[in-house]
Amino acid sequence: MDTYALLLAATLNAGTVLAIAGLGLLINERSGIVNLGAEGMMLVAAIAGFATAVQTGSDWLAFGAGALAGALMAGAFGVLVIWLNTNQYATGLALSLFGNGFSAFVGIKYTQEHLAARTHFSIPLLGDIPFIGPALFRQHPMVYLTIAFMAGLSWFLYRSRAGLVLRAVGESPESAHALGYPVRRIRLAAVMVGGALCGIAGAYISVVYTPLWVEGMVAGKGWIALALTTFATWRPSRILLGAYLFGGVTMLQFHLQGEGVAISSQLLTMLPYLATIAVLVLISRNPVWIRANMPASLGKPFFPGS
Amino acid sequence: MTTSTRRSVLRTTAWSSLAIAAALAGCTKKDDTPAAAPAASEPVAASVAAAPASGASAPLKIAFAYLGPVGDGGWTFAHDNGRKALEKELGSQVQTSFVESVPESADAERVFRDMVAQGNTLIFGTSFGYMEPMLKVAADNKGVHFEHATGYKTADNMRVYDNRTYEGAYMAGVIAGGMTKSNTIGVVGSIPIPEVIRNIDSYTLGAQSVNPKVKVKVVWVNEWFNPPKETEGAQSLIDGGADVLLQNTDSSAVLQTAEKNGKYAFGWDSDMTAYGPKAHLASSVNIWGPYYIKAAKDAINGTWTTGHTWWGVKEGAIDLVSISDKVPADLKAKVDKVKAGLKDGSFSIWKGPIADNKGKEVLKKDVVADDGFLGGIKFFVKGVEGQVPGGK
């Protein structure tokens, strides 16, 4: 029984990385911009966060540095695609490749560093409940903040005026422009917030999840987060659900191996990616699902006054 | 938008792309420095022919190709320590250089050809995956000596060297068997090849030598170096009840995961005490220096011949170091006894009766396995749970 509690706990932890980045990407996609640079932003944020944690010893400053690094990279991307109207997909890919190389380059002298002992978290009382305690209430605070943020984001998008404006910009930038909203600045803000969240996810990887720095350590999590936004049909609650599902599959493959289940480990390694493809196929078959939620101007350039 | 702002945006973009270009240029230069030696302007063939004959006059140029960064704190770090020991021992007789993070792909061939072109006449490739590229380059450069770590193919001018890492795994197992409270220990495996399976089996045999009830759980990450996956694998072993972990991967992630969970683990390839001072029980280390010194001397003296070298505790190539104070004295004494036995040849790890985990006897009573048997191990011994991926 305890084994399953711990499996659940590891799943929440693994899913949190994907959830933070996925929610960030959701915000910028809701404004109509696709940023394929998630992997690169997360890598640069991971080294920025790790270096900050080494220098200052503070995890929270490290998250701040990661957010800043992600926001800056996203800002550069935003200026290119929003004002200079470069192709969003090509620019995003370039950002990803650049982040990969740049983080390796600046990270060389941090490959041998290690952080001080990690603190254990446990919520008083709740953490002591049998089964539920170890499964749910002994996580890093970021795990709970992510859930709270998801709820906040849902409220923002569907209940607040600013959220309505953001969605309007993503649905029809021309109409929003005609109504007098600064479409480009709103998009830049959304892209930078998305970058900052990807940055926090990157810093979470290098500071909490695997507390060290190595080249390319994000290892594809940025791409899974991107797939998640489609998987979730651009809904915050489904992003969280999908993230835990993917985290669960990741942990389950090791759990099954440890239990000696006779399934080839190579096959299990493929599972998260197979699941992505399966879900993409399923939702793409239903045009109503896609049309009901997909921001109509996603990926298209916007020329004000044209 | 006014023209002036557009222009300023363009200017910013131009400057930032310039900065990126500069950074990239810096990057390339950095990559080249380790291998960059005084330009070898003379034809390659001439330098090759001259080197073995000229003896002490010109230094022997030696190049190393490393799999990971020198700062990995594990496999590559240990090789680089070997290179430093070689430089210290032979001083001005040798001149060494290295290239880090050489991928196990067609790129490796390019790196080896580059090393030959720069006048190196002794070249070490420190990973299994360099075997085929090295074989190709060796065929085209008969005057250059090639040394390949952990492989099995040789040529007239290419030989193989390896360490008996399983001896370190066995000694770690002795400690693990004595330290486990749950009677369950775990291994994070990299790629299911005989070398790694042999280490898992030896770890198990070591643990069983002090604790017959011990069980071993294994997870595979299918990579040599992927810290997040190593972490996830280690976490799932711990969640499954394992309380002492060993890894056959190249980073310190498993040890750090054990530290975070208040469990025990070992250092592998290099001394990893600093990465998890509370969790660390001991480190099984590779000491490549003695072999590198021997190989360089062979080349200098003209006594270099092809073949296989497999060194262990006996030759000082494997050791279990930095044993923690948490390990009780009687367990330490058992490790010392094993070490002494391996050193003088009176003790063999792979001595029958040994059965696989399906109950089939693989080594009969009192039979000692030869290197051929050890090189082809594809089964788990009794006590390991699950089966070897792809095995029957």
Image: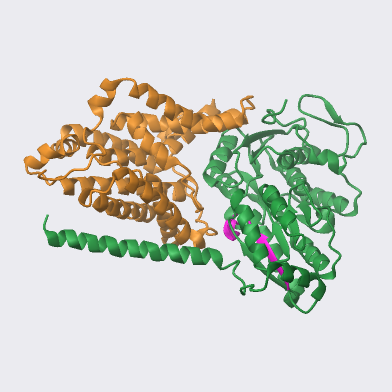
Chain colours: A orange, B green
Image coordinates of residue A31 in percent, x first then y, are 22, 40
Above/below status of B388 relative to A108: above
Q: Residue furthest left?
A: A179
Note whether residue B183 is visible: yes
Residue ID at (21%, 32%): A296
Image coordinates of residue B234 in percent, x first then y, are 58, 40
Question: Residue B59 versus residue A150: which sits nearer the camera?
Answer: B59
The quadrant the C terminus of chain B occupies is: top right
Question: Residue B273 versus residue A179: which sits nearer the camera?
Answer: A179
Above/below status of B75 relative to A243: below
The quadrant the N terminus of chain B occupies is: bottom left
Specify the segment rendered in magenta: B60-73
Q: Is residue B68 magenta?
A: yes
Image coordinates of residue A200 in percent, x first then y, are 36, 48
Looking at the image, residue A79 sits to the left or right of residue A173; the answer is right
Residue ID at (75%, 57%): B147
Residue ID at (80%, 41%): B375
Question: Residue A210 versus residue B377: which sits nearer the camera?
Answer: B377
Note whether residue B278 is visible: no
Question: Residue B117 versus residue B127: which sits nearer the camera?
Answer: B117
Above/below status of B178 relative to B52: above
Looking at the image, residue B121 sits to the left or right of residue A71; the answer is right
